[in-house]
Image (spheres, grey):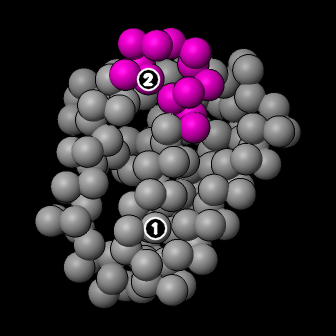
Amino acid sequence: MLSEFFWNLFLFKKILPLLGEAHFTQLEKILNELYQACRQREIEVIVEKDLEFHEYLVSLTGEPYLITLWKSVSSRIVFHFMTNTREQHQADNFTKLINEHKELLEAIKTKNWEHIEPILKEHIY
C-alpha cells in the first residue's frame, strides 16, 4: 500500500499543474456514469467506471511506464473489489464508494496536494 501512495504522489505532482476545466468535466462525466451504475447496482459497470476514473488521471501523466503499470495493477483492483469489498459497498447502496470519489474529485479540483493527500490516503486504504 505504501508503494501505491508514492505512485499516486508522483502522479498527482505531475498532473496537478496541467489540470483544467476540460479535465474536471471529463472526470465529472465518468463519476456521473459511476453514480448511475451504482443506483442500478450494475457491478460490472461500477468497476469499469471506477477504473476509468483512475485510468484517466494516470493517462494525463503521458508517462508510458505509469500507464503500463496501471494496466497491470487494474486487474488486481477488480479482483479485490469483487472478492473483498463488493458486498460491503452493496450493503450501504454504494454510498461510501460514491462519497469517496466525490470527495476525491473535489480535492483534486483544489489542485492543492496538502488537501488531496489525506483524502487520497483514505481512498487507497
Do the numbered discs 1 and 2 sit on residues whose CB atoms are within 8 Å? Answer: no
Nearest the eye: 6 or 70 = 70
At a point 49% along the width and 78% down the height, the residue shown is: 38
**Residue at x 72% of width, y 19% of height:** 17
Instruction: Tell me which residue sits at (64%, 40%) in the image.
Output: 108
Classify the position of the N terminus by image quarter: top left
Residue furthest toward the left?
83
How many angstroms separate mark 1 from mark 2 (CA)? 21 Å
Where residue 78 sits: x, y (%)? 27, 54
* Quadrant of res 114: top right
- In terms of depth relative to the viewer, which is nearer, 10 or 52? 52
The disc labelled 1 sits on which kind of residue? Val
Q: Which residues are magenta?
A: 56-68
Q: Determine the main secondary structure of the stretch shown in magenta.
A: helix
**Residue 15 pos. (x, y %):** 63, 22
Q: Is residue 72 above or below residue 79?
A: above
Residue on which the image places disc 1: 45
Q: Secondary structure at mark 1?
A: helix
Q: Earlier in the sequence, mark 1 or mark 2?
A: 1
Residue 64 lies within the magenta run: yes
On screen, residue 118 versus residue 74, left or right, reads: right
Element carrying mark 2: helix
Who's the residue at 58% across and 72% down the image?
Answer: 35
Q: Which disc, if any, is residue 115?
A: none
The quarter of the displayed image where residue 30 is located: bottom right
Q: Which residue is mark 2?
A: 67
